[in-house]
Amino acid sequence: MTRENQQTGATRPPEHPSFPRRHLFVAACCGIALTLLLALVPSDDVSASRQLVPVTLPLQAAPDIPEEPEPPILEQWVNLTVNPGDNLSLLFGRAGLTDADVYHIVRRAPEGKSLARLYPGEQFGFLLDDEGHLAALKRIKTPLETLLLRREGDSYIVEQQIREPEVHRSYASARIDSSLFLAGQQAGLPQTVIMELANIFGGVIDFVLDPRKGDVFHLVYEELYIDGEKYKTGNILAAEFINKGRSYTAYRYIDETNRSGYFSADGVSMRRQFMLAPVDFTRISSNFNPRRLHPIYKTHRPHRGTDYAAPRGTPVFAAGDGRVTEAGYTKANGNYVVIQHGQAYTTKYLHLHKRRVRKGDRVAQNQVIGTVGSTGAATGPHLHYEFLVNGVHRNPRTIHKKLPKGKSLTEQEMPRFLAQTQGFQLQLASIRQQQLALNQTEPNR
Ligand SMILES: [Zn+2]
């Protein structure tokens, strides 16, 4: 045996016809054992956390192996990730294909043209035939959705593969020390869940100005798994937010027409005509910033709105559904937007860095209409927000108590609501109990 043979013999097909099968098997075992040995020998840079498990390999026992049946031909997919700046030609090139293959699939496959739009990070799989041409293409759009194009003669058959994730239920609790956003992060919640929590209670709590140190929230939410691995977070199922000692609870409910929404325990919808804080609170680092109501921002005399100090560029939302009646610039207001909501209500947003809507646009609640800035007579980046009822300025911080409450479920619907949410209510109560017990054992801070 030459040195080269020793190193590679384990994986090479027998070149020498006189090499008996049995020897090959032993050689293969030795090869595997050697590889494992090399991998297992501790070296200085092996981290302490790696657990080495002793492995016993049958080195000698090489029973006579019956003739194996031909192994099934496995499809050898070439898997590639789209890089920034990639196009189909570059991607196909890396898979060993030519521009002729690109041209063929784009022209011949149903929806072939849509292939040309690539997104960095996207996964593709290529299956080549014996002549090195494309036999099939996989586009993994999300872990749940794959598009499969299989060549049939001169055309392609399209197959949409959809997977259902496994849904697990999860819990989280947090106490707010500096901001809701940080508390949520410390509880291991992704930004989307914290935003959803703020959306659910956004009609009854101003998430910029209301949270106080010591506020607590509890959540029951879904986590979606694929092949035993967490894929992403699903819906919030139940939530409690205790603001300044007052508890607000919300439960997710799906009605007979398959529409979902959040309702209090007595069946009143959490959705209000107006969100209290029309800014993306996640960009405001502290809810307890003493500067937030600093008179420095009150450049309007008399001051008839609420000021939200926030970094320049923070998204500003439409407080409710409506129509843009003004979007322009004045020396005092800077870039500003005015939205009319039905007959009675008007909201105004001043000192914007950028406007994202035009006069006449229809806007939906929580739609981004601009970004926080300091244009016009403003000394620092902040949103100046005004709320008018029939043309009269009202305090947006207190007016919501006088606005209509959320819609109530009908008496006929309540049994369905209770059947769906009673389990969540019990879970929420048990999380609350656990947290209380924990807090009692914790040393005072
Ligand atoms: Zn102001």
Image: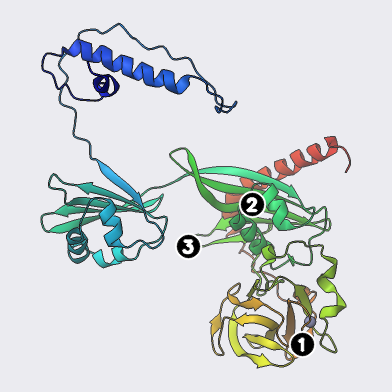
Task: Give SS at disc 2.
Answer: strand
Q: How crowded is mark 3: few (under 14 residues within 10 Å), some or many (20 or more)?
A: few
Q: Residue at x 27, y 12 (%)?
A: 26
Query: Which residue was labeled with disc 3?
Result: 257
Q: Residue 238 carries which label?
A: 2
Q: Which residue is drawn at 27% across and 14% down?
A: 27
Please state the horizontal and vertical placement of residue 407, each as a whole percent of the image: 64, 69
Quadrant where the N terminus sits is top left
Please state the horizontal and vertical placement of residue 98, each as a whole percent of the image: 20, 57
| Residue 345 picture quarter | bottom right
Please state the horizontal and vertical placement of residue 254, each as a whole percent of the image: 53, 57
Spatial CA distance of label 3 from label 2 is 21 Å
Please state the horizontal and vertical placement of residue 410, each as a whole percent of the image: 61, 64
Q: In this view, does 382 lie to the left or right of 120?
A: right
Spatial CA distance of label 2 from label 1 is 43 Å
Q: Which residue is drawn at 73% across and 76% down?
A: 381
Q: Which of marks 3 and 1 is nearer the N terminus?
A: 3
126 or 200: nearer the viewer: 126
* Identity, as a three-letter code, of the amino acid under mark 3: Thr
Query: Which residue was labeled with disc 1?
Result: 377
Q: Is residue 443 left or right of residue 411?
A: right
* Identity, as a three-letter code, of the amino acid under mark 2: Ala
Considering every residue shown, the one lying at the far bottom of the view is 330
Classify the position of ligand 1 by quadrant: top left, top right, bottom left or bottom right. Answer: bottom right
Considering every residue shown, the one lying at the far front of the view is 2
Q: Which residue is drawn at 84% across and 37% down?
A: 442
Q: Residues at badges 3 and 2 in contact (C-beta under 8 Å)?
A: no
Q: Which of marks 3 and 2 is nearer the N terminus?
A: 2
